[in-house]
Image (cartoon, rainbow, N blue to C red):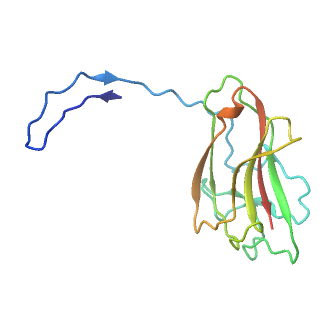
Amino acid sequence: YYFALKAGDNVGNVSALSNVIAATTKAVAVVFRDDFEYGFDNWNVPGNTWGLWHIANHRYASPSHAMYYGKDTTLTYDTGSGNRGNLTSIPINLAGVQESLLSFNYFLATENLWPYDAARVQVSADNGWTWSDLFATTTSTGGMIKKNLSLAAYDGKFIRLRFYFDT
């Protein structure tokens, strides 16, 4: 990138071009990526009692698939009783990474009532023994939303990510 300035006043006088400053952005290194086009081998679905977490071909941001929490027949997560489930990543190595960032797309259709229908994105730096919320919401999106979350506090560590839904 190259930057330079010209300044103008309220009567139309314009300065000469300032000195030109050059800058280069850092290259982005992708350390983990999954679009669910080829299954979900990079993820674990513990206690998927209702079978609600699965790969589906609706409400996606990748070419044709997404991980979905719900029933394909009704496009809801109504099982007739309360349910919850999480999708947990394999360990992700952030060694040598600076200013790490998690970027994902999501669609949420809920009753917009806290604490019910809470969606969370969580991180663990101790192999899943404890989890910290990076993002939590109960608000329906009405469409696909792109979200970026800083993982810089975990640079240099092994982490796991978890997408969690509770109703």
**Residue 160 picture location, percent across and down:** 79, 40
As drawn, 26 above or below 75 = above
Q: Residue furthest front?
A: 10
**For residue 5, which quarter of the picture?**
top left
Residue at image coords 71%, 32%? 154
Quarter of the figure with the C terminus: bottom right
Residue at image coords 68%, 71%? 112
34 horizontally vs 53: left or right: left
**For residue 150, which quarter of the picture?**
top right
Quarter of the figure with the N terminus: top left
Judge whether residue 41 can be spotted in this image. Answer: no
Residue at image coords 72%, 71%? 113
**Residue 159 picture location, percent across and down:** 77, 35
Judge whether residue 145 can be spotted in this image. Answer: yes
Closer to us: 130 or 72 = 130
62 horizontally vs 125: left or right: left
